[in-house]
């Protein structure tokens, strides 16, 4: 469920702001949103409910074992896939504007 929510939120960035926003900035916003949601979800399912779904406590830069710098960097890179895929799906299926991206 968290992954689906993150995909939708990454795709909604272009809906609320201009296409002129550089893709790396969209990726940064996405990575920050994903990391925040991962922390919130981790605190609930891992710390509060005790499900132990993931544990980053052995990584060097982490917070309560729920998020880590390494995973945030991965979210930054993977968010590009989510952003581009969402934009093209909206173009193909809903007739929205053809996607284009600025790198800076």
Image (cartoon, rainbow, N blue to C red):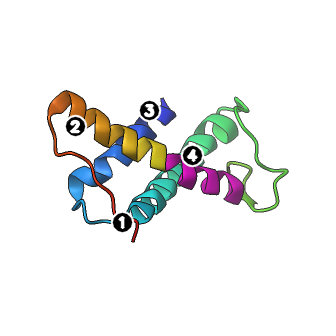
Of pointers 2 and 3, the one earlier in the residue sequence: 3
Of pointers 1 and 2, the one earlier in the residue sequence: 1
Identity of the residue drawn at 21% across and 45% down:
98
Quarter of image, res 73: bottom right
Provide residue 99's location: percent of width, then percent of height. Answer: 26, 48
> Which dot marks residue 38?
4
Identity of the residue drawn at 29% across and 47% down:
12
Q: Which residue is mark 1?
A: 22
- The magenta span reads 68-79
Of pointers 4 and 1, the one earlier in the residue sequence: 1
Horizontal arrangement in the rendering, residue 72 relative to residue 18 (left or right): right
Label 1 and label 2: CA atoms lie apart by 19 Å
Q: Which residue is mark 2?
A: 91
Label 3 and label 1: CA atoms lie apart by 23 Å
Identity of the residue drawn at 76% across and 42% down:
55
Pick whichever, 13 or 98, lies toward us: 98
Label 2 and label 4: CA atoms lie apart by 29 Å
> Which dot marks residue 4?
3
- The main secondary structure of the magenta stretch is helix
Label 2 and label 3: CA atoms lie apart by 19 Å
């Amino acid at each position: 469920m968290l992954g689906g929510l993150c995909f939708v939120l990454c795709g909604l960035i272009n809906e609320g702001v201009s296409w002129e926003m550089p893709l790396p900035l969209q990726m940064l916003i996405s990575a920050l949103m994903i990391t925040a949601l991962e922390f919130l979800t981790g605190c609930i399912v891992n710390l509060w409910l005790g499900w132990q779904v993931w544990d980053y406590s052995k990584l060097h830069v982490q917070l309560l074992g729920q998020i880590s710098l390494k995973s945030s960097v991965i979210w930054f890179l993977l968010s590009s896939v989510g952003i581009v895929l969402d934009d093209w799906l909206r173009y193909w299926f809903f007739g929205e504007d053809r996607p284009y991206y600025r790198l800076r």
